[in-house]
Image (cartoon, rainbow, N blue to C red):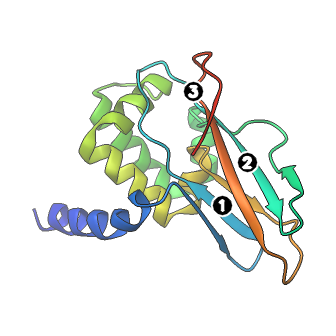
Amino acid sequence: MRLFLTMMLLMTTGLAHAQSLDVVAKYDGEGIDVRWFPPPPDNDNQTSRYRIERTDSMGRALSITHKPLSPITNLATLRAKLGPFSATYEAAVLSAAREQSFSMVSLNRALRSSAVGDLIAWFAVTYPEVADVLGQRRLDVDVQPGASYTYRVYMDRGDGSGEVLL
């Protein structure tokens, strides 16, 4: 019970900031860490893809993703990217989805679950690796010292409706 209350406290304090913003960009020593927090998927089969665009102070726009980013559902890749934390991530997704195997369907069900969706969002805020496997992070290392940039993230839900600016 104590662990559950601690997790709920951490989730609410960490998420209050993330849920008020759709896109966050911050210099992290290597480059600019761009993360985004899209709305939950509309259905079990939705496959959202994200494209990131950077505009410099001169108004020049550049797409910084060569191919759209999307969530990773291959367990071997997940485990390689998340290391020991993969067990916690997998358990959160599978418990909410009430599934035995990890897939896009189980991930979408977990993201639509209010408590587990918030927990996964908190993981993405706290751990860059989780944001990476969710397809919700891009590290922009091609930046110039002293320059200012504006980032835009476009989401395509894969339903034929086209891209939406987050």
Give the secondary structure at mark 3. loop
Q: First in sequence: mark 1 or mark 2?
A: 1
Report the residue at 74% width, 36% height from top: 68
> Where is mark 2, residue-wise?
52
> Would you call the spot at circle 3 few (<14 residues within 10 Å), some (14-19), or many (20 or more)?
some
The residue closer to the viewer here, 42 or 45, is 42
Q: CA distance from mark 3 to mark 1?
A: 20 Å
Q: First in sequence: mark 3 or mark 2?
A: 2
> Where is mark 1, residue-wise?
34
User: Where is residue 147 drawn, in percent x and y?
Assistant: 84, 77
Give the secondary structure at mark 1. strand
Q: CA distance from mark 1 to mark 2?
A: 9 Å
Above/below status of 117 relative to 41: below
Disc assigned to residue 147: none
Give the secondary structure at mark 2. strand
Q: Quadrant of residue 11?
A: bottom left
User: Where is residue 75 drawn, in percent x and y?
Assistant: 56, 35
**How many marks on residues?**
3
Residue type, label 1 = Val
> Where is mark 3, residue-wise?
157
